[in-house]
Image (cartoon, rainbow, N blue to C red):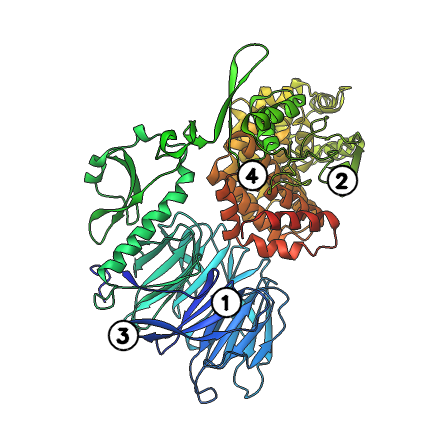
Amino acid sequence: MALASEEYRLHCTLRGHQSDVRSVATTAAGKILTASRDKSARLWLPQSGGYVSETEYTGHTGYVTSICSLHPSDQWPDGLTFTGSRDSTILVYNPSCVSALQQLKGHTDTVSCLVSSGGLLVSGSWDHTARLWSTTAADAFPCIAELKAHAGPLWAVALLPEGGGLLTAAADKLVYLWHQNKVAGKFSGHTDCVRDLAVINASSFLSCSNDASIRRWNIETSQCIDIFYGHTNFVYSLSLISDTSGSFRGFVSGSEDRTLRVWSASGNCRQTVHLPCQSAWSVAVLPNTDVVVGCSDGTCRIFTASCERAAAAEELQAYADEVAAAVRPAAAELGDIQKDKLPDKSALLRPGQKDGHTIMVREEGKVMCYSWSVLKGTWEAVGEVVGGTGGSSATSGKVLHQGKEYDYVFSVELDEGGSLKLPYNNSEDPYMVAQKFIDTHQLPQDHLDQVAQFIITNSKSAPSAAPASSFDPFTGGNRYIPGSGTSNGTSNSPSGGDPYTSVSSYSGAGRPHASSHYPQQKPLLFEACNEQGITAKFKETNKLVAEQVRLSESEVDDLLKGVFGSENATIVKTESLGPLEKALQWSNAEVWPSLDLLRLSLRSRELQERWIAGNKGSGIVNLLLMLLKPPSPANTQLLALRCLANLAAHEPGSQQLSNSADVIVSTVTELASFPNKNLEIAAATLLLNIAVILTLKTNDLSELCQVLSGLCTLLLTCRDEEAQYRALVGAGTVLARGSPECSQFANSLDLRPLLDTLSTSATPKVKECALHLTSALPA
């Protein structure tokens, strides 16, 4: 096969499953195995130029999440089929029988991945373990080993050739090499969950990740030797392409970016195959090099580089139309693009930067999307982009406001003169829109009912019942203020009052995504202050640090008076900035008492206006992120997280968090699996605050999705109930205030299974919030 000259095109589409096809596999005989969220699996047999469903496997009580086959052997002449499920079990089938031969129990959470070879089956689970099962016995499949090392759910397992051991990959961003059931190597480099593995030979393998990259690793040195970029979203699955002699010729990958990509052996992206579905969950290559793709729309699509096996012209055109139609609902993400600022068709005269590079151009009054094909050396039309950037109010019945279409755009007259535009869609909760309008324009909170009733009256919307009283979503009535050490200080809030706004506020119960737990209106701060303990520790540490950064007695007095000396604890004298800057130069192991003073200082609006809003704003964030990373001790990491969270106290710091959201979220996500509950709570609070800020400031889809991904990682790794709850409230805030695409993205993160687990929590608020979020996600 010559990858450079042959193009993959649709061969056929397998229909039969009622929900996402989450896993696909192939057999040596060229048959296809599929596993679906509809709780079934199927075996497909080649027939009449396509495939027919030969066997439907049933028996699982939860989504079927993984599938693999065991090649025929003397022990099993027909081979075996294995399926893993959210019900925590593995079922074993004779390939031609619908009922299972045996059920394998041992895992305590979703069995997310399976691989089998020789006399061995390897399974990986969200319970953070891998298990090895023997397949050589006639009537039993005993578990012969349990592998524990990962700090997060496993997503992939792979066997090395020639008895070289096995690989496991997980949400903790790591890949481990195992020999004789012990860790023999660790591969670190991905910045998000590692989703799949593909072994090239005994010395190298590929991995893909939610960080949108594919990496090639040297097994002997544990070093990454290549990084391949091309996908623009999570990369879920990999599969190798081999020639008839078994030599490695390239690989394919499936992603959340609606594409299948074909790569050469050297890592060049040769072709981008656009899909009419959001997610390409799983890919597998057949012996004839055809590619099988498990899709989120419940279908399984097969693509071929063979002219003989390509679908007929009319089928290829129908598929192209299906892909073009899929562009339209996706266009909501493009609502802020102005059509008159897009290039015209002359832009198509310039070649694309890489295969799959997409551009939008103006063409006869429409906006068209084109994708560059390296194989053909041309731009190919994907389809017309409609929605936020196409059509008009005349044709859609909508009103355009700031590049987006709404059912109504009201003019709200202000008492002091002038007016503000208030956009509203019938599908939205009037109170939620009113609250966002108030927050955006910094209007008095007591205008909430007036604005909401204005929307209801003028749009003829059904009123949403506001709750009888509002309460702090973190305690049900008392505000939890994390302090130093492990103390859990609380302060009472007035009955029926929102402790973050000091007035009653609407919590959005009428909107499907909103609940009494979210969206969070104001950031949470770490305000507890043990003045005596903080002062003593700071003075003690100051005597031990290097002389060049040691503070004089007068500097120490000025700093402590600046932080603690005012009757109003939220006002810090700016004279203390100099000594505090000097104290922040202490070593990673010594600096944490200085960070505790910074944490308290950041409550001051005056300090933020004088320091954070200036050129030092990005510098303080960079310093805190540096102190957050190893080899900083846990105390330093904890106070760095709390300082970052307290930046949200006032507008200058909030703006800095908004500007630096991507690098902050990425760093926190990379460090997930914190060693104690205080770190977990601080990390969850920081991401919650960023969620609040972004939803009220920019509401940028890509930023919100990144925060949502980070919160999901914390939900996977946190064991503390308070941290879990704060992460849930953060996710709820994003989903309640974000666009519908955020909910679709949450489904792609497998948030629902996480919520299912948390909905059984013994902590009432965690359980209730998880149940609310589950009901809010699209089916």
**Precedes in sequence: disc 3 or disc 4:** 3
Residue mark closest to the camera, 3 vs 4: 3
* Residue 17 rendering spot, x and y as whole percentages: 46, 65
Marks 4/1 in contact by CB < 8 Å: the verdict is no
Marking on residue 244: 3
Q: Amino acid at mark 3?
A: Thr
Q: Which residue is mark 4?
A: 625
Element on which disc 2 rests: loop
Which residue is pictured at 54% across the width and 34% down the height? Answer: 694
Q: Residues within 10 Å of mark 1 (few under 14, many from 20)?
A: many
**Quick check: 387 above or below 634?**
above
Q: Residues within 10 Å of mark 3 (few under 14, many from 20)?
A: few
Marks 2/3 in contact by CB < 8 Å: the verdict is no
| Spatial CA span between label 3 and label 1 | 27 Å
Residue 476, numbered label: 2
Residue where numbered disc 1 is placed: 66
628 vs 297, nearest the viewer? 297
